[in-house]
Image: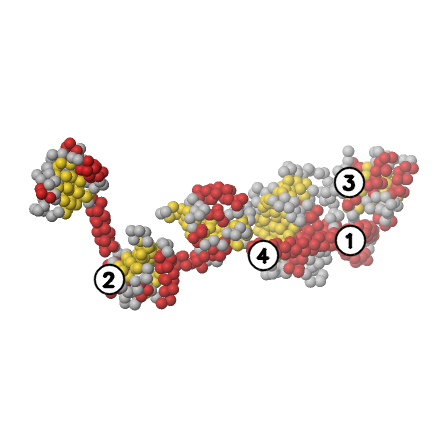
Amino acid sequence: MDGKETSQLGYIWAAPDPILIADADSHIEFVNMSALRLLAYSAPELIGQPVKLVLPELRMPPFGPPVCEQHAVRSDGSMVPAEVTVNQGADAGPSILIIRDLTDRKRAAAAEARLALIVRSTHEAIIARNLDGVITDWNPGATRLYGYRAEEVIGRHGADLVPEHRRVEEETIMAAVGRGQVIDRHRAVRHRKDGIPIQVSITLSPITDDSGEIIGVASISQAVSTEELADAKIVGVLEAAPDAIVVTDAKGYIVLANAQTSRLLGYTRAELVGQPVEMLVPTELRRAHIAYRTKYASRPQARPMGLHGEQLMAQRKDGTRFAADISLSSLQTDDGLLVAAAIRDATDRLAQQAEHDRLKALAEQERLARQLQQNQRLESLGQLAGGVAHDFNNLLAVIVNYAAFVAEAIGDASGDDPGRWGPVTRDIEQIQRAADRGIALTHQLLAFGRREVSRPRVISPNSVINDVYRMLGRSLGEHIELRCRLADDLWSVRADPAQIEQVLVNLALNARDAMPGGGTVTFTTENAEITEHTDMLWPGRYVQMRVADTGAGMAPEVMARAFEPFFTTKPKGEGTGLGLATVHGIVTEAAGLIRISSWPQRGTTFTILLPATDEPLYKEKERTPVLRSKGAGETVLICEDEPAIREVARRILARNGYDVILADDGLHAIRLARTHAGPLHLLLTDVVMPQVLGKDVAEAVRAQRGDVKVLFMSGYARPVLAGSGTLEAGVNLLEKPFSEDGLLAAVREVLDAG
C-alpha cells in the first residue's frame, strides 16, 4: 500500500462506527477498533474469516439490499441488533461494511412504545397543549374523564373545558407553566361533555424539545375522590380558622400552613413549607426551642405550649415580635408523626388580662380597706364594750351581794311571819334573776371585746363538739336534726375549751332560730393546709370546723354586719345582738378566723379555722372543790377604788372570820402594807384603778412583805393577762361580779395554796 492508502486506513481504524473491509470472496481483510470493541474479537481472530462469521444474515449486493437490519454475532455468541450498510467496490474490488449498533435505538423505541401504551392505558386524563393552549394530544383516560373522543377535541382550545369564571385563573397557570414552572395537584373545576362540572386534581408541567426549549404544556388530571373532597373541606376549615395553624413533621420541618399563618407572620406558604419551624421563633430562643421540640416529639400530647405559665413569643418575617398563645396537638400518620401548632396573637388578651388584674387589684384594695375599717370598728366597739362591762360589773357586784344580804336577812325574819315576808322574798328573787342576766350579758361583752379571761389548753375539737352534741341534742327541739361528720385523724388546737363550747352553742342556737319550721344543723371537722399568706391567715396547719344549717340564709347586707355587737335581725326583745359578736371575739382571740357563707333560702355555713399544734393533749387534773369556810383570823388588805365594792368585800370577809384592812387606791394600800404592825396574809386588789394599777400595787407590797399572797379581782382582766390573752403564770384572778361564796372560796384557795 502506498502512503495514501495507509492514511485512509488510519482514518477508518479510528472511525467511531464499526467498519469491516471484505474482499471479493467476502473474507475480512480489515477491521477497525470500533468493530473489535463491538464484536469482542481481536484483529488476528477476524482477518481472513468470512463475513458471515459475524454477520450470518448478510446477503451481499446485488443479492441483498445495501442497507439492512440484522443481528451481528459477538465472539461469545450473543446477538447485537445492527444496521449494516454495504458499499460494494467497483470491478469486484473490496467492499466496506459499516455496522451501527441499534441497541440504544431499539431500547428507546421500546420505551417509547411502552410509554405510549401507558398513556393509552392509564386511567388519568393526559392532555398535551401547545403554548397557545390548543389541544394536541388526548389519551383514552381523558375521554373517560371528560366524555370527549380525541377527534372531538384535538385542535380545540383547552379553555373550552374550563368554566367561564375560572378562565383568567387558567390563563395565569398556563403562563406560569410556559415559563418553566411545574404546578402540582392543582384543584380545579372542569366541564364534561354532558355539561356536568367535576372537581379534578391537575398536575401541569412544560413540554420541551431536544434542545430544551419549551414547546407546550402537559397535564395529568384525575377526578377528586369523596375522601379527597372531605380532605378539601378540612383544608377549607383550616383556611377559615382564626388562628394560624402550622403543621410540622417529626424533624420540625413545616409541611402545612394555613392562610392565617401568612397574615399573622408575613410569610407566603411557599416560603414556609420545607423550612424548619424555628424560623418563627425569636433568634435567641431557637436553640432551646429545638430541644423542647425534640422532647415533645418523644411524648406528644395535646397541651398548651410553654412551661409554668411563661409567655411565649413569635417572630414575624420582618423581625418584629409579638406575644403568642400556642396550643400543640399531634397525629400519627403513615408518613410519621405530624405536630400541629395553633398560634394566636396574645397582645389583646394580655391587654385585657392586665386591665382585669388592675381592676381585681383595685377591688382587692377596696375589700382590704373595708375589712380594715370593719376590724377597726369592731376593735373600737370591743374597747367600748370592755369599758362598759368593767363599770357594769362593779354595779352588778353591788346589786348581787346586797340583794343576797337582804335575802339572807329576810330569810331569817320570815320564820316568824312568812305571810308578810313571802312577797318580799319573791321580789328579791326577781332582782337576783335580773342580776344574773346582767352578769351573762357582761361576759358576752367581755368575750366580744377580747377582755374575757382565757384559759387555753391543748384540746381535741372533736371532743368539744361531742360534748356540745350531747348537750344540744336535748335542748334544740324535736324539729331540729343534729348531725356530726368529724375527721378521725383531726389535729389538736390550743384554745379555751369552755370558750370553744360557747362558740359552738351560739352558732347552733342561731341556726335553730333560722329554721322555725325545722331543719338540719351539721357539725363537721377536717384538717386544712394553708399554703399562701392572706390578709387574715399565715400559711400553716389549721383545724377547720363548720357549723351549717338549712335555714333561711342571710342577705349580703346582713352578712356584712353579722359580727357587729347589738346588730340583730330578730324581733325586738328576742335577741341581744351579742351572740355572733362573742363568737368573733373568741375565735380572733384564739388566733383563728371565722367566715360566713350564706345564700337566701339556701342556708348558712360558719367556717372556723384554728391553728393546729403538735403539743400533747391536756389532761384534766382532779380538783378538790373548795367549800365555803370561815377565816381563822387571817389579815386581808382590800385595795378597791369603788367604795361600794370595797364595802361589800369587807362585809363578806369580816363576818366570815377575817381581819380586814381597807385601802381606797393603790398608793394607800402600799402605805398600809408598810405601816401595818401585824401580819398581812393576803392582798385582795382590783386590777384597774386610778394612779396605780393592781399589778404594780402587788409588786410593791410583795417587795415589803415577801410572804404576802395576792388575789386580783376585776371585770376587765386585760392588764394582768399575757400577750397571748391568757392568764399569766402565778396570777390568781377573781372575776367580777362575784358572790359571797365565790369570794370566800377564792380567798381560801389562795391562802391554802402552798
Residue bearing mark 1: 384
Is residue 576 depicted above or below 64 in this figure?
Answer: below
- Comparing marks 3 and 4, which lies closer to the viewer? 4
Displayed quadrant of residue 558: bottom right
Residue bearing mark 3: 732
Q: Label 1 near label 4: C-beta < 8 Å?
A: no
For marks 3 and 4, give the CA distance: 63 Å
- Where residue 150 appears, x then y in whole percent? 24, 62
Q: Is residue 410 left or right of residue 263?
A: right
Q: Residue 462 or 544: which is nearer the viewer?
A: 544
For marks 2 and 4, give the CA distance: 65 Å
* Badge number at residue 352: 4
Q: Residue furthest top?
A: 44
For marks 2 and 1, give the CA distance: 111 Å
Type of amino acid at the residue the image marks with label 4: Gln
SS of the residue under disc 4: helix
- Comparing marks 2 and 1, which lies closer to the viewer? 2
Q: Label 1 near label 2: C-beta < 8 Å?
A: no
Type of amino acid at the residue the image marks with label 2: Ala
* Badge number at residue 453: none
Q: Is residue 79 left or right of residue 247?
A: left
Type of amino acid at the residue the image marks with label 3: Asn
For marks 1 and 3, give the CA distance: 25 Å
Specify which label sits upstream in the sequence, 2 or 3.
Answer: 2
Residue bearing mark 2: 150
